[in-house]
Image (spheres, rainbow, N blue to C red):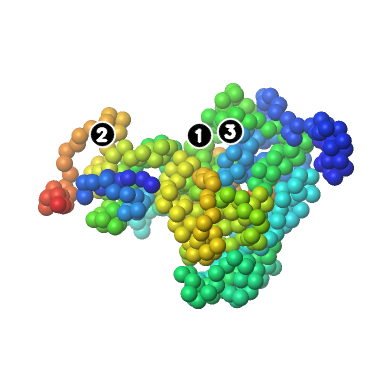
Amino acid sequence: MRRYSVFAVAREALRGHKGWDKQWTSPEPRAEYDVIIIGGGGHGLGAAYYLAKEHGITNVAVLEKGWLGGGNTGRNTTIIRSNYLYEESMHIYEHSMKLWENLSQDLNYNVMYSPRGVMMLSHNVHDQQSFKRHIHANRLYGIDNEWLTPEQAKAYCPPLDISASARYPINGAALQRRGGTARHDAVAWGYARAASDRGVHIIQNCEVTGIRRGPDGRVTGVETSRGFIGAKKVGVSAAGHTTTVMKMADVRVPLQSSPLQALVSEPLKPIFPCVVMSNTVHAYISQSDKGELVIGAGTDQYNSYSQTGGLQIITHTLDAICELFPMFRRVKMMRQWGGIVDNTPDRSAIQSKTPVPGLYVNCGWGTGGFKATPGSANLFAHLIARDEAHKFNAGLTLDRFRTGRLIDEAAAAAVAH
Amino acid sequence: MLLIYCPYCQEERSELEFRGAGDAHIARPTNIADISDEQFEEFFFLRDNPKGLIFERWRHQHGCGRFFNAARDTISDKFIMTYKAGEPKPDIGTAAAPHAPVETYEQLEGEAK
C-alpha cells in the first residue's frame, strides 16, 4: 500500500494522478479462512482490521452482500459522542471516542473527524435533571460533559433561538466538546484499505445464504452466493439483517428491525458550528463539510426492511428544527433516506458469543452505531480472537435478556426513538 | 405514511391515528410466576423479526381506541389484511381462508356504527 501524504499528493499532481493504486483488492475467495466477518460496514471492516493489526490473524475475509458501507454506515448522521449514562455504555463509547481521535493517523486515511461539540438542549426541569445526572456520571468516569446556561448555549451555537417567546424555550444545555462528526464513507473505505493491506480479503457482492455447522455443532463455514467458504470462526456484524443471518444458525436474537430516517438540505455556506440535538422535541442537526444540513429523524413504529420510512416522521423533526432555528425555515431539503436499525429491548448493543461454538455476534447498535464503530470493531476483534470478552464489552452479552442484567439505556439515549 | 383499515371502524384511515403494538398472537403464560428464565425470555424478549410476512397488533388510538391484528409485508410495508383481536391467525398462504366465527364483542353486541 502506498501511503497517503502531502508528498504523495504533490508527486501525483505532477504526474497527472496516474500513480494512485486501488485502495483495496478484490480477490477470489479462498477455500477456508480463520475468521469470516459477515457484513462489510464500518463495524465489520474495522473488526477485520483489528484482527489483523492487534491479534495477528490475517487469514480473514469480510463478506458483503452489496457494496462496502452501503448499509447503515453510509446512511447515518455521522455523530460521535460518548456521554452515555451507564458504565457499560460509557466504557465502550469512550473507548471508541479515543480511537476516533487518532483514527485518521492510524489508518493513514482522512476520516475527517471533527470534534466540533455535541450540544443537547434542555427544555424543562426534567431534561435539566436528566442531563445533569448524565454530566455528573460522565465526569466521575472522566468523560467531558458540561452544563451551559441558555446564553452560553447561544454563544456556542449562534443560530439557536433562546428567546422566552420561542415555541420551545431552552433552560440550558449539556455540551460534550470532544463530540462531533466524521465522514462516514471514509470510515468504511479507510478500514477496508488498511485491512486489505494487512492481507484481509474483502469480498463484495457475496451474500451469505447459510451457516454450516459440523457434527459437534461448531461452525465450519458459510454458504454464499459464490459457493461454500470454510471458516473456523464466523463473526456476524449485519445490523438490521442480523436476525435473518442468525436464523441460519438457529440462534434467536432479541432484535426488532425498523427504518431510521435522515435527510439533508441544499448546501449552505458554513452557518452551523456544532451538533445540536433535542430529545424533548426531537431535533437532531449538524452541517456537513459540503454545506448540507444533516438532519436525523426518528424510527418508524413498526418493523420494516423497506429502507424508506414514513413522511410524518421527518416532518415532525423538521417542525422542531424550524422552531429552534427560525433562520432555516426557508431552506430546501434535498435528499431523504432510511437505514434499517436493529434495536434491542434495552437499547444497548449485543457483542457476544452465541450458543453455537465459533459463532460471534455484534448487533443491536440500533440508532447509535456509527459513533461506536472503532470501539465496537476493536472489541469485537478481541472477542473473536481470544474467545472471551474484553472488560469493556463484557456486559453486552446475548444472555442478559435471560439473566435480567439489562443495560437500560432506552431512557438515556440522546433522542427519543 | 401508511393507510390502515380498521376492522372495527371498517374504513381506511391514516397511520397517524394508529399506534403499533408489537407482535400479535403472543399469549402471556398463565403461570407467569412458575416459568423458567428461558421461557420468560422467549415470551418477553424474543421475536421473529421476519423479513416478509409479519403478524402484528395495532391500536386505533385516535379512533375507536381498540386493538386489532394485521398481516403485513415488512419488505414493502403493504398490509395484506387486518382482522379483529381474538380471531385466529389467518392462513395467508391460502388467501385468508374463512374460519368459524369467534366470540368477540361485535358478535355479541353488533358492529359499531
How far apart are labels 1 and 3 at the CA level? Answer: 19 Å
Which residue is found at the position 76% from the left and 53% from the top? A102
Q: Nearer the viewer, residue A413 or A215?
A: A413
The reply to whether label 1 and label 3 mark residues of one chain is yes
Nearest-to-viewer mark from 2 and 3: 3
Q: Residue flagged by tag 3: what amino acid is it?
A: Gly
Q: Measured along the vertical axis of the image, is residue A178 above or below residue A77?
A: below
Q: Residue type at mark 1: give it.
A: Met
Nearest the camera: A290 or A236? A290
Subunit of label 1: A
Between the residue at mark 2 and the residue at mark 3, the CA separation in whole angstroms equals 35 Å
Residue A251 % position (x, y):
50, 40
Secondary structure under tag 3 reads loop
Is residue B79 among what the camera can see? yes
**What residue is shown with label 2?**
B96
Q: Are marks 1 and 2 on the same chain?
A: no
In this rendering, would B14 be left or right of A213? Answer: left
Label 1 – label 2 distance at C-alpha? 28 Å
Between residues A379 and A20, which one lies in front from this camera angle? Answer: A20
Residue highlighted by disc 1: A248
Residue A324 bears which disc, if any?
none
Quarter of the figure with residue A161: bottom right
What's the amino acid at mark 2? Ala
From the viewer's perspective, tell me whether residue B37 is left or right of residue B100: right
Instruction: List the single residue furthest toward the left.
Output: B109
Along the polypeptide, which appears first: circle 1 or circle 3?
3
Instruction: Return the x and y of residue A390 as percentages of the image width and height.
Output: 67, 53
For label 1, the SS is loop
**Residue B16, image x and y in percent?**
35, 53
Q: Chain of mark 2?
A: B
Instruction: Identify residue for label 3.
Output: A66
